[in-house]
Image (cartoon, coloured by chain):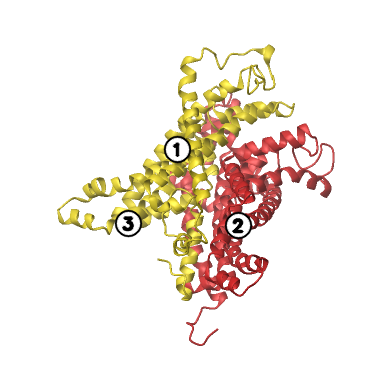
Amino acid sequence: MADTGTDPATEARSYRRRRSSVRREGAGDRRPSSRRTVRRRRPGSGRPGPGEKRRARLRQTVSIAILVLLGLAVLVVPPIVDLDQQQVVLRQADLPPSTDHPFGTDEVGRDVLLRCVYGLRVSFTVGIVAALVATAIGVVVGAIAGAFGGWTDRILMRLVDTLASVPHLLLGIFIVAIFRPSLSAVIASIALTHWLSTARIVRSEILSLRERPFVDAAIVGGATRWRIIRRHLLPNVAPQALLAATLMVPHAIWHETALSFLGLGLPAHLASLGNMINDGQRSLLTGVWWTSFFPGLLVVVAALAIAGLAGHLRDRTDPQRRAELML
Amino acid sequence: MKPSAPPRPSLAAAVWRLVLRRLLFAFPVVVLVSAGIFVLGKLSPFDPVAAYFGVRILRASPEQLAQIRQDWGVDDPAWLQYGRWLSRLAGGDLGDSRLFSQPVSTVIADRLGWTVLLVGVGLLTALSIALLAGVAAAWHRGGWFDRAVTSLAYAIEAAPVFWLALAALSLFAVQLRWLPAAGVSDTRADVSFAQVAEHLILPAAVLGLAQAPWFVLFVRQALLTELASDYVLAARARGLAERAVVLRHALRTGLLPAITLVGARIPELITGALLVETVFSWPGVAAATVTAATSVDFPLLAAMTLLATVAVLAGNLLADVLYAVVDPRVRADG
């Protein structure tokens, strides 16, 4: 595709393409980047070796194992463990990590590990729901823009560009602030700021699908536009959408913790990871580091594990990208 | 240039065209964002008159309330209010911040310098880390350093900025007591250069570290791409030293996009500043925005959102202009 020959115009275009594909990082951008072309053309110099492949597989296995473990903890612990995460034991306040309390206890003597499990549950729920809503918005907008084209496309994409010009967290803060912090406001603020990349991916995917013979066949067969979108286009973008949704979950969790940390997120009685870090911040100056450290560590572990899972999904859905181990 | 090459537009003309086109795009964006902010403000259950009175609203007479509602034009049709707000914005009047009891423009003017200082030093830190680590990692691809850098980059990328900030605060300010924890100067000390420098280290380092992974991975990838290209092969065939091949040939070309892309990272820098300033009680605009949000100071919040949008658009423009300036090939592309 992108010829890295001597023609300056072609070269500049491939240059720009590379840049724009980097700018829209993540989220399964399928633009043909010159990077991959170069790799395929020159085996040996740029292609990952067998060691890298093995490590990538190991990373994916570990990620999935961690996710299963976290999932089990989140799903199984709350119903079966006979401990109250809200139980206040003032005599055991601010205990450092020990065998009794692996993550220590907080300022009113609650077990940090137990609260982390509950916090992870809340954060996961918010993250997954928000990612699903955002993906749904993105798929609908992207499909309409791609399938209808013309002015509809132009207006919708201008809207996407406009929203992309406002920093996500700032817009999120704005939305939450004026609608009062609550669970639904947080989910809305995440969903409304994160559908842009999905819309772009789905649109470009649909634009290329529209040129394919089976769509022509459907048109000749007399299918209506909506039927073509529903039966022929959407099923083909589903893998991309799933991948985008998976990659969005850590973003959404990150967003939720950031909002909660700023005091603009979930109500204080819901133990989300962000709320716990916010609580822990107060006792940090007295040397109690564990109440804020461990919830944050869980965010990192969960985000990395989900990224590993996304890499696995990508390999499964798109064998062409197997060579590309970068997330 | 060979005589047979197609004529290229001059640099000034190309840049001018680019700026003009971007401004044509930016204007509707800013108007649209301001309209969005206004609509959201109207949809919210927040009542500016009630907020102005606070608890005193219980003692205010209905006539007083009606008078204020009329003076402020709260009950006018929405398009009229929006037009009024927009024309005031165009005239440079951003309204009054309820929280700071000052005009919004004063609040911003007082604090913008601190934010620019923090973000600037943080960005320089990130770029230095990226240049050193990215080049070293790409040079010995697949080696232990490369693997360590790449894994660490992903880990830091996944970590919330405020968590990194809290960890650094806990370790260096509370446990080791090497550095001050908050503000720009010690209590009762004057704001002097030494004081500010000492207080700047932690927040700037955290912001730089949090921004570094993306740049590191980018520099590494860009360098790897260049190392696989024809001219590097040619340089190697000529028997040049590895140092010269990597640093003089590949790095120069590979770095172009990385440097220009700084402008496109403005949104992430703003996000980072919001969180880092809050943790370290840095007196910048970003922390003020968070405070404005928690106390629903609508004029300040709206002004900050607009300001951030303008900054992002300016950053994109800067990236494109820089790119056209340093890379003549882009100009031909128009």
Label 3 sits on a secondary structure element that is: helix
Q: Is residue A182 visible?
A: no
Q: Position of residue A238 (x, y in %)?
A: 33, 44
Q: Position of residue B206 (x, y in %)?
A: 68, 44
Residue that mark 1 sits on: B43
Which amino acid type is marked by label 2?
Ala
Distance, label 2 to label 1, CA atoms, is 51 Å
Q: Which mark is residue B138?
A: 2
Q: Is residue B189 above or below residue B334?
A: above
Q: Is residue A68 above or below residue A50?
A: above
Query: Closer to the observer: label 2 or label 3?
Result: 2
Label 1 sits on a secondary structure element that is: helix
- Same chain under badges 2 and 3? The reply is no
Which colour denotes chain A? Answer: yellow
Q: Position of residue B209 (x, y in %)?
A: 66, 46
> Within 10 Å of the Cα at label 3, are there few (<14), some (14-19), or many (20+) other Cα atoms?
some
> Within 10 Å of the Cα at label 1, are there few (<14), some (14-19), or many (20+) other Cα atoms?
few
Host chain of mark 3: A
Of mark 2 and mark 1, the one earlier in the sequence is 1
Proximity of marks 2 and 1: CB atoms separated by less than 8 Å: no
Which amino acid type is marked by label 1?
Leu
Residue that mark 3 sits on: A207
Q: Position of residue A108 (x, y in %)?
A: 65, 17
Task: Kindly identify the residue that appears in the image at 51 percent across and 79 percent down.
Answer: B8
Which amino acid type is marked by label 3?
Leu
